[in-house]
Amino acid sequence: DRLICGDVGFGKTEVAIRAAFKAVADNKQVAVLVPTTVLAYQHFQTFRDRLKGLPCRVEYLSRARTAAQSKAVLKGLKEGDVNILIGTHRILGKDVQFKDLGLLIVDEEQKFGVSVKEKLRQLKVDTLTMTATPIPRTLQFSLMGARDLSVISTPPPNRYPIQTEVHTFNEEVITDAINFEMSRNGQVFFVNNRIANLPELKA
């Protein structure tokens, strides 16, 4: 039962992929629990691309999948054809049966409630928990020695140090910042508090 702490973009997902593949190589199944449907699909793409060409079947379960797709995934899971299953708390449902679950990976565990965590404890398998911001209860467990703690403190080589600037709304500053990030193949999150303004901002 290990907690991995690291800033966004420090490589927690890479650690998870390698741990998952190690479990699959030992003929065990892996469950990856994430808080949102969007993240489930993102992780599915990342895991699938990284493990392409290897004898490892990656699937995902979420509200975004049709009933027929979900049924096929559950069948494959029960028969052992699906090696890695990624999903929201849907994967803790009673109809989800693993043939031989060996590893559970929980991403952003601070977004799950205590009831979900109790269900996880009942699985009694090796657990890898990843977070950038551990909640006090989790941190307390780690500091007490009830679970192992690993901290990824070294940024990847191409990682720029974080810069924080506060400005009044200025289109030029925003355009420059976005263009710089796009020029290095980065990603940009633009957070706005009003849904009605989104088309205006996009323009």
Image (cartoon, rainbow, N blue to C red):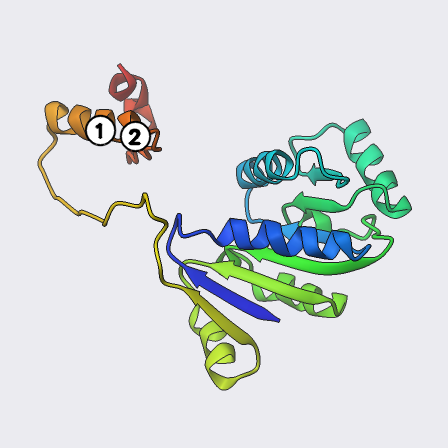
Q: Is residue 195 above or below residue 159?
A: above
Dot 1, crowdedness within 10 Å: few (<14), some or many (≥20)? few
Q: Pointer 1: what residue?
A: 180
> Do we see residue 29 in this rendering?
no
Mark 1 residue type: Phe
**In this rendering, would 188 be left or right of 3?**
left
* Image quarter of the C terminus: top left
The residue positioned farthest toward the bottom in the image shown: 144
Across and down, in percent, residue 182 comes to: 30, 26
Q: How many marks?
A: 2
Q: What percent of the width, then of the height, locates residue 2?
A: 57, 69
Residue 126 percent location from the top left of the image: 69, 67
Task: Report which residue position mark 2 lands on.
Answer: 184
Work out whether residue 48 can be spotted: yes
Q: Which of the two residues, 201 or 42, is positioned nearer the viewer here?
A: 42
- Mark number for residue 199? none
User: x and y percent of residue 103 in the render?
Assistant: 71, 60
For the residue pair 46 and 93, the one nearer the viewer reads as: 46
The secondary structure type at the circle numbered 2 is loop
In the figure, residue 42 lies in which quadrant?
top right
Relative horizontal placement of residue 195, taking residue 97 as reference (left or right): left
In the picture as drawn, the residue positioned furthest to the top comes out as: 203
Image quadrant in which the N terminus is located:
bottom right
Q: Is residue 28 left or right of residue 104?
A: right
Q: Are marks 2 and 1 in contact (CB under 8 Å)?
A: yes
Dot 2 amino acid type = Arg
In-image side of 129 versus 179 (left or right): right
* Closer-to-camera residue (78/199): 78
The residues tagged by marks 2 and 1 sit, at their Cα atoms, a distance apart of 7 Å
Residue at 49% x, 64% y: name it: 4
